[in-house]
Image (cartoon, rainbow, N blue to C red):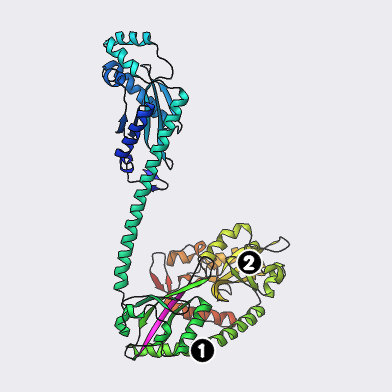
Amino acid sequence: MWIGGYILNYSLSELLDLPKLKDLLDSLNAVQQLPSAIVDIKGNILTATNWQDICVKFHRLNPQTKKKCLESDLHIEASLDHLKACTIYRCPMGLIDAAVPIIIEGNHLGNIYSGQLFLEPPDEDYFRKQAQKYDFNEKNYLKALQKVPLFSEEQLRNNLTMIHHLVQGLVEQGLQFKHQLEAENKLRQSKEKYQRIFENLQEVYYEANLQGKLLEISPSIQAISQYTREELIGKSLKDLYVDSNAREHFVDRLLSTGRVKNYPIHLRDKDGTQRYCAITTSLLKDSRGVPVKLIGSIRDMSENEQISEQLQLQIKEHETSQKLLKESEERFKALHEASFGGVGIHDKGLILDCNQGLSDITGFSIAELIGMQGLQLIAPDYLDQVLHNIKSAATDRYEVEGVRKDGSIYPLSIKGKTVQYKGREARVIEFRDITEIKRAETELRKSESTQRAMLENIIDVIMIIDQQGINRFKSANIEKWFGWKPTELIGEPVWNRIHPEDLTSVKKSIATIMNEPDTVKTGECRYLCRNGEYKWI
C-alpha cells in the first residue's frame, strides 16, 4: 500500500493498539450505547462492541436474510471506496447502518462501522410481519427489537465522528511510532557502519573548528604520530605543525578556495620526529554560507621520496600563486579584448564579463551585456541545443542562429569551455558571426552539382573542411570504403573519427595547410568505420 509516496508495510492491526482501542470503545458504549466495529481493508473484524441480537441471532443466521445483510455490507463498502464522508444506509431488514473510512494520507486502510440502530421509533407491526415471513420466534424477535438503540441522525453522526477521530488519531500515532522505530534502526545501523569505517580508516579523518582545535580524529592517527585519538581531541592542529607558517599558508588557501587537496605539510610525531604528510581539507559552511568548521584527511607521505619532492615543489608553487594569478588575469583580459570574435564569460547563462567583439556582433553595449541572460542572444529554435551543451560542458564548436539587439537573425558559430573565474567555475564562450562563411557556402553550392558529378566519379574519397576543421563536403565513396553516409558527417569536426593516437599529427597537418594555402601535405592516419574498426588511410 502506498503512503505519501512510499510503500507502507503495515496492516491496520499493526498500527493500532487493539486492546487499548477495545477498552476505549467499550467505555464509550457504556455511556452512549453506540454499537461499533473496526474492520480492516481485507474485511477482518478487529474490534466489535454492542453488536445487536436482532442481527447476530436472527438476520445473519437465516439464509434468506443473511443474503440481504451481505448485500447491505457490499453497498456500504462500495460507497466508502469513493467517499470520505460518513455513509448512512437503511438495510433491507429495516435497521440503520453507518460507516466512515479510515483514511491515512489519502490511503484507505479500513472502515469504522456503527449500526443496528434506529433514527426514529420502529414500526413494531412491520417487524412482527417480518418475523412471521422469515419464521423467526416472534416473542424473542420483538424482545431483541426493543434493545435496538434509538438515535437522532445528528447524534449518530456526532458519535461516529468522535469514534473516527479517536481511531484515526491512534492509527496516525501508530504509524508515527513505526516510522520512529524505522528511523532509529536506520540511525543505529548508520552509526555502526560509520563507526566500523571510522575505526578502520587507513588515512586519518579529522574535524576541527576554524581556530584549528580538533573536534574529532580517527584512531588511525596513532599509526603515523604515536598520539592516541583521545590525546589529540581538544588540542590545536598548530601544535602538530613543524612550521607554523605552513599552517598559515594552508588556512589562507582554504579560505580563498573552500577546498585544498594534497597540501604538503610537516607534522611532528609524539617523540619529535618530523613526518611528511599530505592534507586534504574542505571548508564546511552553514545554510547562510558562513564557514563553521573544517573536515578533511591526512595521509602519510614520508616513505615516498618522489612524492615528498613533489610536495616541496607545491609549497614553492603556493608561495608564488598570488603573483601568477594576477598575471594570468591580466593576460586573460588582454587576450579576450584583442579577440576578433565575441568572448563572454557566464555562470549558468548569466553574463559576468565580455569583450568589445561580443558587443560588435550582437549590437548590445558591454554595459547592457553584463548581467544579461545570455540565452537572449540565441534564436528560440536553438535554445535546447545550447542548454544541453552548457550542462554537458561541451567543448566542440557548433553552429546555431543568433539574435541581435535589433531582432535580426544571423548564423552563429559557438565554442565553449569551462574555466575557473574569480574563485568559481564558469563558462567562456566565443561567438563568431559566420554570415560571410554561409554566403560563401551558398555560392559554392551554386556550382556544386558539376563538381559533385566529377568528385563522385573519382575512386578516392574527397572532402572539404573549413578553417575550424568542420566537414563541409564528403564524396559518396565515403560510404563504400567506411560505411558512413556523407550526410552523417557534414557539420562535425573532421577529427571526430580519427584514431586518438593520430589526432596530434592530423591537427598539425591541417593547421599547416590552413596557415600556408600553397602547401600540399601527405600523411597517414587511422579512420573509424561504421562497424567500429579503423582503416589506415
Along the line of sight, the residue nearer the viewer: 201 or 57:
57
Residues shaded magenta: 274-289
Q: Is residue 41 visible?
A: no
**Image quarter of residue 21:** top left
**Image quarter of residue 310:** bottom left
Q: Looking at the image, is 415 positioned above or below residue 139?
A: below
Question: Percent position (x, y) of residue 383?
Answer: 59, 59
Q: Quadrant of the C terminus?
A: bottom left
Along the line of sight, the residue nearer the viewer: 436 or 392:
392
Q: Which of the numbered marks, if any, corresponds to residue 319?
A: 1
Q: Magenta: predominant secondary structure element?
A: strand
Q: Is residue 278 magenta?
A: yes
Label 2 is placed on what type of residue? Leu
Location of mark 2 (residue): 412
Residue at image location 38% in from the left, 85% down from the top: 277
Label 1 is placed on what type of residue? Glu
Residue at image location 61% in from the left, 57% down from the top: 381
Identify the secondary structure beneath mark 2: strand
Along the line of sight, the residue nearer the viewer: 347 or 418:
347
